[in-house]
Image (cartoon, rainbow, N blue to C red):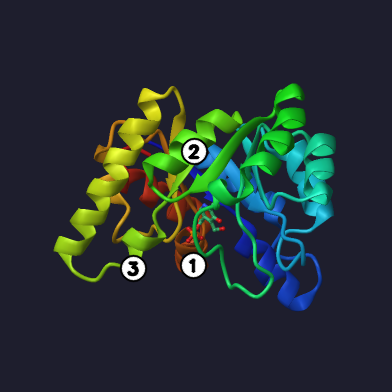
Amino acid sequence: MRLSVNIDHIATLRNARNEFDPDPVEAALLAEKSGAAGIVCHLREDRRHIRDNDLERLRRAVTTKLDLEMAMTDEMQLIALKTRPELVTLVPEKREELTTEGGFDIARHYETLVEFIKPLNDAAIAVSIFIEPDHHAIDLARQAGADMVELHTGIYSLKETEEEREKELENVRHAARYARSLGLSVVAGHGLNYRNAAPFSRIDDIEEVSIGHAIIARAAFTGLENAVREMLVLLGGDA
Ligand code: PXP
């Protein structure tokens, strides 16, 4: 099980003072050094955390895999084509939300999505779509030309009883199997933390988890290297 680390909230903290520290690029390098398989950043329309200059610097510094999370807008498409991350993850984005609130509504945006993905594919940028663990959404992602899907685990993370969590996990497990059977790579993410992430390491069809908030929050107490390594151990690694 690989781990991608989202470093957006290092930028959130930096922006609280609007100066230079802590630097998201330094965080990316520490996360890589500690075993992260990739670095994720979400360039939002309102630039509330990662900014354009961060993205440019991250592109130059990251040597594992840079995953640019972004909304399906012309502005973001141009930025992706210019920056050339290894991976673009398309997410729905609402200006007023605190964090991404759910999977991309592929059925609603299908025609636009097909046209949006083409130039990214032509530029050899892999495309992932953040979706609910749902067979129809997976079919549409495949048809639209995605290489990968990221299954939304936010619903799982909010379940309060073991029984409810297991039920939602089963949902994700089925969706992952189906996506892999169609030839898609599968990532899972959102709301995963030190209490709820371990079961994903036992789902063979999920290759990677993408985690941000929990790791950055723990890093405030233990340091980022320890926070990343602890998560890797939970996911069955030997970091
Ligand atoms: N995956 C996607 C698509 C996201 O939008 C986010 C949040 O930015 C994450 C994963 C990470 O979620 P969290 O910060 O809850 O770990």
Under circle 3, the secondary element is helix
Residue 158 is marked as 3
Residue 134 shows in this picture:
yes
Closer-to-camera residue (159/141): 141
Q: Residue at x 44, y 53 (%)?
A: 226
Q: Which residue is mark 1?
A: 217
Mark nearer the N terminus (2 vs 3) = 2
Query: What crowding class fits label 2: few (fewer than 14 Cα within 10 Å), some (14-19), or many (20 or more)?
Result: many
User: Alpha-carbon distance for marks 1 and 3?
Assistant: 18 Å
Residue 149 is marked as 2
Query: What crowding class fits label 3: few (fewer than 14 Cα within 10 Å), some (14-19), or many (20 or more)?
Result: few
Mark nearer the N terminus (1 vs 3) = 3
Give amino acid for label 2.
Answer: Val
Mark nearer the N terminus (1 vs 2) = 2
Query: What crowding class fits label 1: few (fewer than 14 Cα within 10 Å), some (14-19), or many (20 or more)?
Result: some
Q: State which quadrant residue 9 falls in.
A: bottom right
Q: Quadrant of the N terminus?
A: top left
Q: Position of residue 123 (x, y in %)?
A: 77, 25
Closer-to-camera residue (144/174): 144
User: Alpha-carbon distance for marks 1 and 2?
Assistant: 26 Å
Give amino acid for label 1.
Answer: Ala
